[in-house]
Image (tube, grey):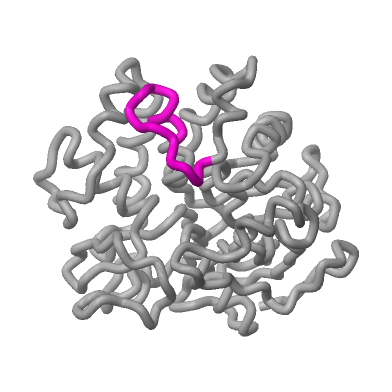
Amino acid sequence: MSLYCIGDLQGCNAPFQRLLQTIDFSPSRDTVYLLGDLVNRGPDSLGVLRSLVALGDAAQCLLGNHDLNLLGIRHGLRQPHRDDTVQQVLDAPDCEALLDWLRHRRMAMHEHGWLMVHAGVLPQWSMAQTLALAGEVEQALRGPDLAGFLTGMYGNTPAQWQDSLRGAERLRVIVNALTRMRFCTAGGVMEFATTGGTQTAPPGYLPWFDVPGRKTADTPVAFGHWSTLGADTLAAGAGLLANTLPLDTGCVWGGCLSAARLGPTPGRFELIQVPGLLGSDTNFAAVRSTAPGGRAEGSANLGSDPKNPIRRRF
């Protein structure tokens, strides 16, 4: 039995299938933990969702900001952005079944000694509180007023957690921390405009995992979302970064798709990487080969030969 964490798929089904083949994945034996952003920006979000549903309990998935936005679009609360590639899901005959499956995914998990989230954890949250707050959002997603929850989900304020928050504001802060955060202040005030690497932190802000006194610092955290961080960190051959493992390595931007095979003790892992879109879907990737802001995402020196994946142990 092997256990794997996999970074953002973002509709990249061909690289996902290549990765499953590379690790010789068996649904009857192994488990994959997907760290959110299953859909959007890539060419085959429909294929990704159908593949994950078919894997059953062997695929344990978190929700990311793109996944939640797909639910918002389906409920008429947002119009698709010009860069969104989810129309094939919305037009599919099994759309309702797929989105019902999606709304029942998790917001955070603690498995095999690892805390797993899509984006980040506020520094004042303990692991137990993180899981409990994630559960509040999960309950709202699965409840009878999904449209009401999604209506209140959008927005950047409040930017700081307070235990006294209630209703839509409380759920919005939880969603933003778990699915959108990269930087925050030492007091936990979040910032959402900056998408570059750690060196681009606005004055007074830190990467969320570098905040002194972070309550989850003793627990290894696997997360996605931050492709400019994950591509650079793993390409440099680094292990854990402040006891965190960033696994979004820009598959949809021409980087690679990364999996971490979890070791026998928390914090130990083997990294397996296969080419992303540029390694297989060249026609699509030709118009998506740079990240927002014009920054080409890292490829971890990965060639285009799917038979030659990168493997490193940490």
Q: Percent position (x, y) of residue 242?
A: 44, 78
Instruction: Tell me the quarter of the picture where residue 260 sits.
Output: bottom right
Q: Percent position (x, y) of residue 84?
A: 51, 42
Q: Looking at the magenta stretch, what is its main secondary structure?
A: loop
Q: Percent position (x, y) of residue 134?
A: 35, 43
Point 19% across, 41% down: residue? 170
Task: Report the magenta residues as a range.
Answer: 70-84
Does residue 1 show up?
A: no
The answer to if 119 sits in the magenta stretch is: no
Q: Residue 117 versus residue 285: which sits nearer the camera?
A: 285
Instruction: Tell me the quarter of the picture where residue 237 sits.
Output: bottom right
Judge from the rendering whether residue 285 lies leftward or rightward of residue 199; answer left or right.
Answer: right
Up/down of 125 relative to 74, above or below: below
Outermost right residue: 307
Instruction: Tell me the quarter of the picture where residue 197 sits.
Output: bottom left
Give the number of callouts. Answer: 0
Quarter of the image where the C terminus is located: bottom right
Judge from the rendering whether residue 21 lies leftward or rightward of residue 241; answer left or right.
Answer: right
Q: Residue 171 versus residue 91: which sits nearer the camera?
A: 91
Up/down of 28 relative to 288, above or below: above
Point 82% across, 44% down: residue? 26
The answer to if 82 sits in the magenta stretch is: yes
Point 57% across, 44% down: residue? 38
Point 34% across, 15% down: residue? 144
Does residue 191 show up?
A: yes
Q: Percent position (x, y) of residue 79?
A: 39, 32
Judge from the rendering whether residue 102 lies leftward or rightward of residue 144; answer left or right.
Answer: right
